[in-house]
Amino acid sequence: MHSDRLKRLLESVRDGRAAVDEAMEQLQHLPFEELGFANVDHHRAIRCGFPEVVFCPGKTPEQLAAIFDKLRAAGGNVLATRIEATQVRAVRQVCKEVEHHEVARCITLRQMPAEPSTGTIALVTAGTSDIPVIEEARVTCEIMDQKVESFCDVGVAGIHRLLAHSKALQAARVVVVAAGMEGALASVVGGLVEAPVIAVPTNVGYGASFPGLGPLLTMLNCCAPGVAVVNIDNGFSAGYLASIINRLGG
Amino acid sequence: MHSDRLKRLLESVRDGRAAVDEAMEQLQHLPFEELGFANVDHHRAIRCGFPEVVFCPGKTPEQLAAIFDKLRAAGGNVLATRIEATQVRAVRQVCKEVEHHEVARCITLRQMPAEPSTGTIALVTAGTSDIPVIEEARVTCEIMDQKVESFCDVGVAGIHRLLAHSKALQAARVVVVAAGMEGALASVVGGLVEAPVIAVPTNVGYGASFPGLGPLLTMLNCCAPGVAVVNIDNGFSAGYLASIINRLGG
Amino acid sequence: MHSDRLKRLLESVRDGRAAVDEAMEQLQHLPFEELGFANVDHHRAIRCGFPEVVFCPGKTPEQLAAIFDKLRAAGGNVLATRIEATQVRAVRQVCKEVEHHEVARCITLRQMPAEPSTGTIALVTAGTSDIPVIEEARVTCEIMDQKVESFCDVGVAGIHRLLAHSKALQAARVVVVAAGMEGALASVVGGLVEAPVIAVPTNVGYGASFPGLGPLLTMLNCCAPGVAVVNIDNGFSAGYLASIINRLGG
Amino acid sequence: MHSDRLKRLLESVRDGRAAVDEAMEQLQHLPFEELGFANVDHHRAIRCGFPEVVFCPGKTPEQLAAIFDKLRAAGGNVLATRIEATQVRAVRQVCKEVEHHEVARCITLRQMPAEPSTGTIALVTAGTSDIPVIEEARVTCEIMDQKVESFCDVGVAGIHRLLAHSKALQAARVVVVAAGMEGALASVVGGLVEAPVIAVPTNVGYGASFPGLGPLLTMLNCCAPGVAVVNIDNGFSAGYLASIINRLGG
Amino acid sequence: MHSDRLKRLLESVRDGRAAVDEAMEQLQHLPFEELGFANVDHHRAIRCGFPEVVFCPGKTPEQLAAIFDKLRAAGGNVLATRIEATQVRAVRQVCKEVEHHEVARCITLRQMPAEPSTGTIALVTAGTSDIPVIEEARVTCEIMDQKVESFCDVGVAGIHRLLAHSKALQAARVVVVAAGMEGALASVVGGLVEAPVIAVPTNVGYGASFPGLGPLLTMLNCCAPGVAVVNIDNGFSAGYLASIINRLGG
Amino acid sequence: MHSDRLKRLLESVRDGRAAVDEAMEQLQHLPFEELGFANVDHHRAIRCGFPEVVFCPGKTPEQLAAIFDKLRAAGGNVLATRIEATQVRAVRQVCKEVEHHEVARCITLRQMPAEPSTGTIALVTAGTSDIPVIEEARVTCEIMDQKVESFCDVGVAGIHRLLAHSKALQAARVVVVAAGMEGALASVVGGLVEAPVIAVPTNVGYGASFPGLGPLLTMLNCCAPGVAVVNIDNGFSAGYLASIINRLGG
Amino acid sequence: MHSDRLKRLLESVRDGRAAVDEAMEQLQHLPFEELGFANVDHHRAIRCGFPEVVFCPGKTPEQLAAIFDKLRAAGGNVLATRIEATQVRAVRQVCKEVEHHEVARCITLRQMPAEPSTGTIALVTAGTSDIPVIEEARVTCEIMDQKVESFCDVGVAGIHRLLAHSKALQAARVVVVAAGMEGALASVVGGLVEAPVIAVPTNVGYGASFPGLGPLLTMLNCCAPGVAVVNIDNGFSAGYLASIINRLGG
Amino acid sequence: MHSDRLKRLLESVRDGRAAVDEAMEQLQHLPFEELGFANVDHHRAIRCGFPEVVFCPGKTPEQLAAIFDKLRAAGGNVLATRIEATQVRAVRQVCKEVEHHEVARCITLRQMPAEPSTGTIALVTAGTSDIPVIEEARVTCEIMDQKVESFCDVGVAGIHRLLAHSKALQAARVVVVAAGMEGALASVVGGLVEAPVIAVPTNVGYGASFPGLGPLLTMLNCCAPGVAVVNIDNGFSAGYLASIINRLGG
């Protein structure tokens, strides 16, 4: 981790080849990373359970294949999000063992043995159209070794559908809620459970929903405390945050 | 109702003083109202139960006093909305019998005997801060002879508070829901009842609520069918619409 | 916390005055807070005239075919909105008797005998481009057994076109107005009739119309009382609401 | 009007003191105004009927008094808009003959004899709250020697009120329409008359009217041709434009 | 123009078959148009020079062909805007004499002899990308018998290009300015000329131009008086308004 | 529809194996759909450490005093947010032991012994103007028995100020970041730490910051995973969420 | 450059054929450009290093080919931005020597010898998706003879990546920062360097990024002084501005 | 500048009291600033001409007085922006030598001898209401030792006013343009000069100007290259950026 240049500098001091003042001067001009800050860089990937994450849009199939070739060699888990069919095919040619999660638009490469979490993350959607977003969250949670339970199509227009699951929801350690249209589900869930709630507005709806803006505002204005919001359709971010929260519980 | 000029014209035809063609020519040049369309003008006020409505902002106390002086003479019911203290005082000097509804910011003058409706209008608010808006709706309904029942502070963050009233809500013929913040209450109520729901977004909230815009979008995107929306804080319009719907039921 | 009725019911069971099955039956009819409320679940579908409603976007043709297969077996009326050609073909293979409403982008399956309403719902559009939206409303009203009358292309730029129908409009029990561009039609109709007016902004227009936002704001700011607004292009919701209002009139 | 420097330069050429090429070189370096373009500057004020216009906000009473002192000496007509009470008092101390138009928030100083226009400008408002804006237009038209006729409180919620004036409106050479709330009046007027219509959205309304934005969009989306829009509350600009259009008719 | 029913009614009065009161009652129930208001309907088309205008989007080629077939028979001029290639072909099969203006996306059918206007309408664009919009204005003006002069690509980033035409612009009786991007051209032109200026924001630009919103706001905020704005890209409306203004000048 | 458990329970009552009171007790513990769920109601307040929370705006001093009088009797901790001076004085008259947190605009009443958390919540602000918001978060955390550490005025314009604290930040179990202006601090902190980050946009800034909208969008678009956002200025919600997350760690 | 007409006029004065006053009168009526102002027109292109710039969208391949044919003859450097493949092919047929910069979507034609700048422009991007924008800036800088150094994918979510380059960034004379998503990079760079920073928001991101609006607001609200913003995705404008600033340094 | 701890650590290495590996380990745990990065902190203030800048809103008069007391002792120049009267008085009590720039709402404290710049910064405003913003820029430039020249009230509605100064503007090395309303001035200036242009939208205007948003969009969409934009009303930032650009020219 420590750079050779830093080591050589200190050795010069030790050996009397460099004065202290001179060394201090030189320390200032060393490249930043060589001062030991480089550990910030890979601090996530080097711990077990934190996957390398690849955001696929804008990358050519060839670029993605090359990235997977390299990451497989590195030996950690990998999650690629928002992947398209041609990209999947390219990756598979160099890395057959990836798993394709079609609805979630993700592929995963598991290379580290799983160490399942103790607590459960509840994944809730208002409608069936929100499922791709919550599936992205689910795949993210699972590659991060989290236990999840899904509750789909329990939107507030038929409140009994949600209430039927209230015990299960109250048992979860973290809850992720994905909803489009008016996004009211997050408020109701926030009032039902004591656990942290991560709300994901989705790009489902039309007209005054203004691609995700409607549920985004709803969720931000949520009266129930204990609810925070991630970007529209960002199932990955919700799953990631839910995972690091759930880990706190051991 | 029919104008003298129209009558005189037809009498001229009858008496042979005007030819038919000539009369037709003249009919075209009569002022519009004299052709009998004037009934559109006062068609609301002349039926019992439809009040004259006065929107107070921008009117001087003197102007308001003069208006009430005249409307009292006309003998119908009167509703004045968004009235301020100095305006109330001015009206009272010429028309002592007005009733002041302080929270609703209205005054009413009842001159027609009430003929109570058969069905009930449920008036629901998410929080206590929404009460002035729902009170404006209540005063409107009552001057229009409607029975109302109020359910305040039953927002979705504690869904059981709302559910505790579900039978009463389901018994109403029309429901008005006023909510600010995220405005999710309208969706949940819309899913609970079969009756028409009039949703009123309120200017309650801060930050991403953007003075009423947040709940407005929420309510427009409402998944439950049977819900329609009026302007932000427009309790009068919601009450008026609920009243004419409730009347349909006899 | 426990209600007397619940206590008395259990005592009847204990004392042999009520059989277990009978008690379970009664439990279902206890006020909500004393009991489960699964009856909320199907409260709409089990009444005649309320169709099952299927929102088609995001569903595969196969999924839709399966849904219709199941709903046909259930025996109620069905309305599917925003359906596309390939979806229609798939449904028709399993359920030949569906009716396709091409302009309205809907299919309906009628399995319950119609019980026509007494009052009429007037369906009004500003221009010919708004017709798909008002047709969705019409199909919705008709599967809900409502009588409708349509008035198309009567926008305010030629006010006499609208006024020519004022008598017919004033005879309707509910009015639905669909308009894009500036959406001013709802205001004028709201001033002409005494009936409730449901306004539907449409995604017709360009430039400062900002896909439906222009008419949406116009309709929300409507000076005439008795007007409420549903989401942009939401002909279904307008038709549904108009139907349940019209039913109130018997 | 022509500058001395330009004259001297040409005299040098005439007298042989400057060569033609040299003069051309120097012409390029003369200050812009000295080339005779300065006539653009005062081209409006020097014609009869075009007033000097002073926008008062942000000016101290002393500054305004000084401006009027100077403009009175110049001898033309003057219009000051958006003036406040303290500013009026200050101007009156140096220029007693100004006329104060309180509702219009303007003062005018007439120093040129009026030459009344032949055609008439119709000034129309939807409600009484729009009157200050239309009054600003009226004062502007009158100081520009235009004949005007006002039609107030003829909004579309009671369409017969407007239709009662349709003959008078159709007789006008230009129409100015000021409306807040939903601003639908401009569309209806645009459909009734053949004359150019200048629409002024006003800051009247609340909620989804978003200080003038609602009627602004409505008016821009106006289906009737022959309608153009000025800035929110800009009665002056509407009156000015209406005046220069009316003048075209002789 | 007058309906038979009205005539028969008056004849009944004349002949004593109907009492005056009875006739007044019946007058109220006659269809609106039969009272002579129908003249509003076609008041534009029946005057020479006013074309029938057809907005093509949303119409099938067959519908358009049928419309032209009928309008040709009516004998007036016709303007069809926003037309596409397949629509043009369909119209040409039934009406060979239409002229296709490709850049303007219009076709015109001239059946009335032209009566050229005396004044000139200046048509100005900021860039070459704004030309389709100004061409729509030009075609509109020409079918309405107006003389036009075009000044293209004279945007403010090179102010001398505009100034080079200032004399010609000042000679025009009306000016139409089409500009996208920042739309500043309208302000500068408004300051250069004394004639009415019709500003058309165009959908040209990217990023913070937000499809036409940028220039729309610029033009509405224009400091120069005498400028009014039509909808984004609405060359037709600008040309129409310019034409009826120019006609005022004889 | 009826569950077996419910049936068995009723049979026990019938057979004398269960007393009525015992049955009623058991009914409460049946899965939700089989029974009432009033227990949801107080699930927060009855656990130690969860305070009663009072949102002060819109409440009269008298109402607040009455609320505190009642809550003191109930014996739990109380937090009142957004309180004003006159409200504080009224509360103090009935409840001297409240603590006033002036910068945070809160008062607290501690009646339960504190049980300090093990982990630490880091509270970070970009500038000194964001301090009232982070103080509201701090007071919330502390009344919920959480250990906090504050890092103020470490905005990204001087990145070294933040980096100087990176070790301390990395040691926290949860991080709350409050920032106005461009709100970029949340992104940088999100990249520095592995803990969950709760971002609070603040109403600090001017111009294109549009009261909190600027930092709100910034935070929602945050590239770093593990960051979620609460409403503008909502320090309470951020503190509450941070507290329930921190508790997960024991 | 000087017009013949101006020359002839001055010669007339010199020769006594025109009086001075007469000449002054005529000067006023000369076309604007002939007064020597035309030099504004081409002032940029005629200096070395300022390229002719062609914005390709909306131009046909043939038009572009013609433009290049003409500009090659003129002999200066040319930069064409936002060019598409078919346009490139058309240009290449008439002008083989153009260089195509595929990622930057530009072609350049260098005809003037380069005179490299002394200072360096640093080009920085937050992510790899921002590269097309920064490449447009790079190509612009290079055709304007500027030295550049690129730093890609150094977004704030991993702040050490940026800090590792802080010395190089601090050595640049101007810095261009392109970032999408939350756009926070500009703020951090603005705090690290003393040089002017040109920020370019990019259309990279989704959801609450609202095509470039998110980073645009972030950059405008930037706390660090010394930062200014150009339009979304406008790499050309950023590169152009950076170039003229860098030239000031010699 | 270097911390004692770093020095002692290196001395331990030199003296053999610490091994190299051990020193490297410790280096990683030293507080960040002690590694010499602290020079980032004050790098601006320690160079002559860079003032300390204090943003006054939200600071108490006492806090401001204390800040000035300390900064005076530090000996550099100081600029305080957006200061109010009571704050000025408090500062003057501890630091009499500050200069108050009332229109600019700034105070300055000059303690370093001025070293005037060679080039000139042109400061241009569209109207007199924009002067406070440009004055803030002027005061900023002057405390940074820059020569400035002001051109006020030269908005585009009277283009000749601007053109009269075109030579002086073209002579400036940097131009700052402040404009509200439609903000078109920046585009025209950008086309007139070759120097970098810093555009400042101002909060001047009403209606569709939406407090600065109108001119902000105009300036961002500016067609002329070489123009960049700072936040609404941010005269300080514009002046600061103009100063560091001007310095590049020597």
Image: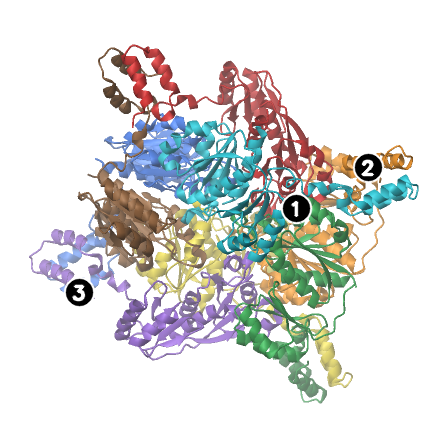
Chain colours: A cyan, B blue, C brown, D yellow, E purple, F red, G green, H orange
Can residue D157 be seen? no
Q: Where is residue F14 in the image (x, y as percent from the top left)?
A: 27, 13
Q: Name the residue under label 3.
A: B22
Q: Which residue is drawn at 34% across and 67% down?
A: E54
SS assignment at label 3:
helix
C70 relative to E129, above or below: above
Q: Which residue is at a point 49% across and 19% down the rendered structure image?
A: F46
**In which image quadrant can residue E10 be found?**
bottom left
Image coords of residue B239 (percent x, y): 33, 36
Same subunit under labels 2 and 3?
Answer: no
Mark 2 and mark 3 in contact? Answer it, CB < 8 Å: no
Q: How crowded is mark 2: few (under 14 residues within 10 Å), some or many (20 or more)?
A: some
Secondary structure of the residue carrying tag 2 is helix
The kind of residue on which mark 1 rests is Val
Kind of residue at disc 2: Asp
Q: How far across and how far down the image is residue F140, in percent?
A: 58, 26
- Spot the residue most to the right: A16
Marks 2/3: CA–CA distance: 116 Å
- In the rendered structure, the residue with mark 1 lies on which chain? G
Amino acid on which disc 3 is placed = Glu
